[in-house]
Amino acid sequence: MQHFNQAEIRQIEDRYQDFLKVIKSKFDEERLARIEKAFRFANAAHDGIKRRSGEPYIIHPIAVARIVAKDLGLGATSICASILHDVVEDTEYSVSDIENMFGPRVARIVDGLTKLSGDFDSRQVLTLKKILMTLSDDVRVILIKIADRLHNMQTLDSMPVNKKIKIAGETLYLYVPLAHRLGLYAIKSELEELSFKHKHPEEYKKTLYMLHNQEEKRNYLVNEFIRPIQEKLETEQIDSIVSHRLKSTWSIWQKMQKKGVTFNEIYDILAVRIVIKAKPGISEKRQCFDVLSLVTDIYKPRPDRIRDWITMPKANGYESLHVTVMGPQGKWVEVQIRTERMDEVAEHGFAAHYRYKDISTFENELETWMERIREHLRSPDSDAFEFLDDFKLNLYATEINLFTPKGDMVSLPQGSTVIDFAYDIHTDLGNKCIGAKINFRLVPINHPLENGDQIEILTSEKQIPKMEWLKFATTAKSRSKIKDAFKLEKKKHLDKGREIVEEAMKAAKAPITSNNLKKLIAHFNLNNKEQLYSEAGMGFLKLNNIDEILGKKSPNKLVKYWNITFNRKKKEEPALQEEEVLSNPKRLDKGKPFLLKEAQDEITYSLAKCCNPIPGDQVIGYLSTDDHIIIHKTGCREVEKFLSSHGNKIITAEWTRFKKQSYLTRLRLEGFDRMGIVNEVTNVISKQHSINMRSVKFDTHEGIFNGDMFLYIHNAEDLHSLISRLEKIKGIDLVTRDENLND
């Protein structure tokens, strides 16, 4: 085995000594000795091992330990576990060895952090489940895991492009919501920025440029806005610091995408923060409201943008007052008001609660959240990817507070419905639920709940759970309970679905081969044939166009899938040559972008129906079978899920020049109605741009104009040119592309 040279040994020692400077003042000699022992052991275990960047591997555990100590404020046990976290996975040492040398607490955390071996497709999901099981006993596991991911993101530049996209997508899908749920605002923001930089590099650069371009103007506005507030605070002898922060590039871009607005239309790019040094003997809440009163004396507030997170803190412990006021030059500015303690908790989350010794409330909140996770983990045979989807539902959701008829409070994620509330109270209540009385008013089972609602669940002994409930059940617990009710039906659905699929294929005179089944699975964006049979058995799939679906596989070949013969023939016979092409496809080089051509090669592709990309859009590919790729837009939500659970099947993709084919695209128009506007719109589309229209629908109501158009577009460049021209028509206020092509 190759050992490190003297220069590398000095590099390691320098990094370790820098780390010691950060922690020396916090620990006694005994704890420092434990940390020293962990470092020397890990350093010896990782001797000669390097990261992809070329630096010694041990530098990574040191960096993770630094984040754990400095940013999370955790103790010696967590620091030792951080230094040792990759020893079991990457060396010959076992968890038992760690326990013998460092004790059961460190070993348990290291075990929770050690990745599982096995099938790559489900490894990330199973790893998450293992972490969450350990989290039931020790929250430090997830905190160290987040620190580990942060350093990996900070050093992502050495990775190939497809790995960057995969890791960044996984981070956005799982680790950012976890950091959010634990109140780690500073780490969450950095993870978002780094993921944005690597997953959408061009958009990241553009957003960064737009922020930089307005910096001077923004600084002037900030100084002009802050000055009267500071003067008032000094007059009232309130000891505080007034600062400002910019909305992150990721948050800005997300808002532009979701709301279809331009950079200049986002009014909350800037936020002013007032952090008060609280006076002893007076409640922090009262002091914050006093400052709110001073601010609204100076600037007029926007009534619908006042948020009181002090009276009712967020589920992750966040406390603050938010108010949006009309500042100088007619600009809306958000003002955040909090004490030093609240600010520390807002930035550093869970660990900060322990530093301030005010943990009882937050521990109760964390325990409630963990109990929901345990409910899901108790079902050992639950599908790993269903678990991932359902778990993700509750990470970002804002909590709302609801009340039972007796006045007991129940917290659920915002967007929860009557059925979610029923299942949260008791499984039988959910199974028998037929509706509810909310504030003494009858509502159906799918009625969305609002903060402060008092709910009485209505039941019937004749009621049984229905699959359609999954369409409006939002919490992981309710979805899990509904699925549990159908587990006994699963085999019946599979058997029925197998019959339906086989009958449909026989009707199309298509043999029931693994290749044909793979084509169906890819067409419906499913994971495996069990899911295909199950969804067919439950009536979720339409199989009336089997011949068309299977025929898409080889559009440039005369022989269709069902004409392939698998008998041994001589090499010169066409059928065998055709089979050889299909069963031995061109090998895909995942290190290079997959080129999308009008004339497909042996490796075929289709465009995802969830986001409907067109040539010129930024896209990536999902390898659904060995020789078929589904192309998604890089911002597609389905891709975020695939990146975290099927990361090895994600590849980069690029368009070649498309000239012949056109693609169905949907545009929506909004504006003010005037005489002749419809004629001008259709003239721009059909005459000036020579674009074919499948359907056009215009509607006007009280002077407001709305258009919904289905057009055949060659590429994104033509689309952007058309949108730019339509936006110049007098009366048109907004033109947006709608990815949903369902009428």
Image: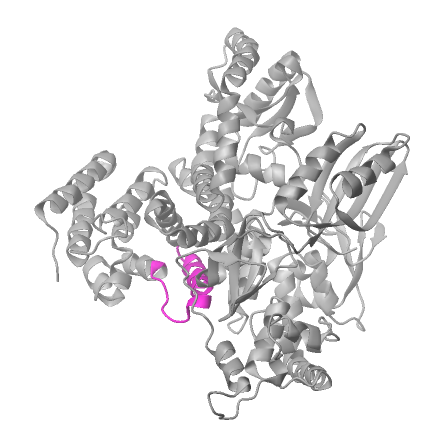
Q: Where is residue 116 in the image (x, y as percent from the top left)?
A: 37, 66
Q: Does the magenta stretch mainly form a helix, a strand or a loop?
A: helix
Left or right, residue 396 beside residue 610: left
Q: Which residue is drawn at 81% across and 68% down?
A: 460
Choose between 610 and 363: the one closer to the eye: 610
Q: Residue at x 30, y 57 (%)?
A: 105
Choose between 105 and 543: the one closer to the eye: 543
Does 552 sit above or below residue 710?
below
Examine the image and state in which quarter residue 350 appears. Answer: top left
Q: Is residue 129 magenta?
A: yes
Choose between 561 and 160: the one closer to the eye: 561
Does 717 sit above or below residue 166?
above
Choose between 1 and 471: the one closer to the eye: 1
From the image, which quarter does the C terminus lie in? bottom right
Q: Is residue 110 in view?
A: yes
Examine the image and state in which quarter residue 91 appears. Answer: bottom left
Does 255 sit above or below residue 449?
above
Q: Position of residue 612 (x, y in %)?
A: 65, 54
Number of numbered discs overlaid on the protein picture: 0
Q: Where is residue 283 in the image (x, y as percent from the top left)?
A: 53, 25
Instruction: Pick out the residue farthest to the left.
Output: 6
Q: Where is residue 392 in the image (x, y as percent from the top left)?
A: 55, 55
Q: Is residue 345 magenta?
A: no
From the image, which quarter does the N terminus lie in? bottom left
Q: Which residue is drawn at 42% across and 54% down?
A: 162
Q: In the image, which residues are magenta?
A: 113-138
Q: Is residue 486 in view?
A: no
Give the colour scheme of this rendering: one colour
